[in-house]
Amino acid sequence: MADDQLPDSVVAAAEAIKSGEMSARELTSACIEKAERLQPELNCFISFQPEKALAAADALDALLLSGDPVGPLHGVPMAHKDMYYRVGEISTCGSKIRKNFRPDHTATVIERLDDAGAIHLGSLNMAEFAFGPTGHNVHWGDCRNPWNTDHITGGSSSGTGSAVAARIAFAGLGSDTGGSVRLPSALCGLTGIKPTQTRVSRYGVMGLSFSLDNVGPLARTVQDCARILGIIAGYDSNDATSSNVPVDQYESFTIDPKIKGLKIGVPTNYYYNKVTVEVRDLMNASLKVYEGLGAHIIEVKVPNHEKLTDLANVVMGSEAATLHGAWISERPNDYSDQVLARIQPGLSYPATRYLQALQVRPKITHQFVEQVFNVCDVLHAPVLGTPVPTIAETDLKGNPGFATLLSQMTYCTRPANYLGLPAMAVPAGFTENGLPSSFQLIGRPFAEGMLFRIAAAYQNETDWHRQAPEI
């Protein structure tokens, strides 16, 4: 089935199946066919399960014919980063160490997606243990960007970015500890949201840094992300850190959104320090769209940001080293050089420094919320300040400036993780190398609805999110 015959979003796919325009089997078969054709080129899957997917599609088609109620994702093919556990099924976490790991429980978010009717195509490639913003993986092979396979997808949710952008899956889950939902969304031309810290359960999800980890969707449209987040968000008794703040009807914010009079903040410091001219031009063009819709563009100085990367590094490094300490001691050769080099410094941070980084976090977040969101409704900033680099340019062994490059990759994304705030990547055009670029919207805690409203208004006026790679 040709791409132009398929629904162009999660929402459209669910409606097409519910209305009988097509069956779940037809849609799943089309996705499987595309996956089999493109996997050799993109390397986006670690585990591919076409037979199970077709069996699930047949069961969902039978359920629809029986007249029983169906869920909001009924028959929609999805695939997720290979760190979301399903009982008894291998979850490699992108690593050699866990290449045969079979969890004894299923992630809450996976159960919620299954209950909503989603179909699971397989598990997707990722940076080893979710530790890397580029998408490199020496154990399972580098994942490739469908816009240009010489270029990175962004990480660590590399396979999710690649598979969804290539129109193999309609959406998928990533994780975001320092930008790993927003970066592959931005680099692959997708919409993706990192929700407020604690908004989504992390039970049954591989951890990297429990103070910074977030679960979030990558999809084609704002409305798709709103629907998926509305399903997976909310309190989970299996995750004591999950919030019991009521979940908004996120999708309602995307229906005929009005933003006239809203204030969009543009940072005067930090976020544009490392931005190229062409990325800045795309950011300005997106702000012009917002001005045309009646929003007010307000300049805002963001507090404490020069400190945030160091503080986030201490937190993530300490917590990652705690999780990996035994393996690093017993099996150091089973890590890639890149990941080992990033985890080992965490073993050297004194406990006092880690505790200080956690202790000042609420104060710094309060200052940010007060000084920024008393002036504007959301903050608008780049996701990546440069055009998408190539796989060769970002390879550890071939690039002596790798540490600097890593810090540049996450320069604009990491602050939202330390602050615990929701942040959403929205496609905003293409740089001269033909690859996507995006802005991000950052909001108050639990203000995902506002992000969806403002992002949906932009997508109603533009078609960047509708464009797909020719692959």
Image: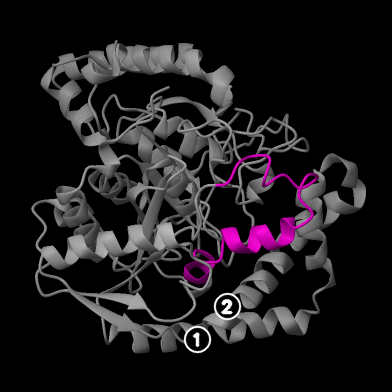
Numbered tag placed on residue 308 in the rendering: 2
* Viewer-nearest residue: 471 or 108: 471
Q: Nearer the viewer, mark 2 or mark 1?
A: 2
In what element is the residue under mark 2? helix
* Residue span colored magenta: 389-417
In what element is the residue under mark 1? helix
The residue at 34%/57% (across/down) is: 282
The residue at 39%/28% (across/down) is: 169
Q: Is residue 407 magenta?
A: yes
Identify the amino acid type marked 1.
Answer: Ile
Q: Give the image location of residue 94, x and y in percent.
A: 66, 37
Q: Give the image location of residue 145, x and y in percent.
A: 51, 34
Q: Give the image location of residue 63, x and y in percent.
A: 23, 18
Q: Is residue 443 magenta?
A: no
Numbered tag placed on residue 364 in the rendering: 1
| Circles 2 and 1: CB atoms closer than 8 Å | yes
Give the quarter of the image for residue 47: top right
Q: Give the image location of residue 413, x and y in percent.
A: 50, 63
Q: Is residue 92 visible?
A: yes
Quarter containing the C terminus: top left
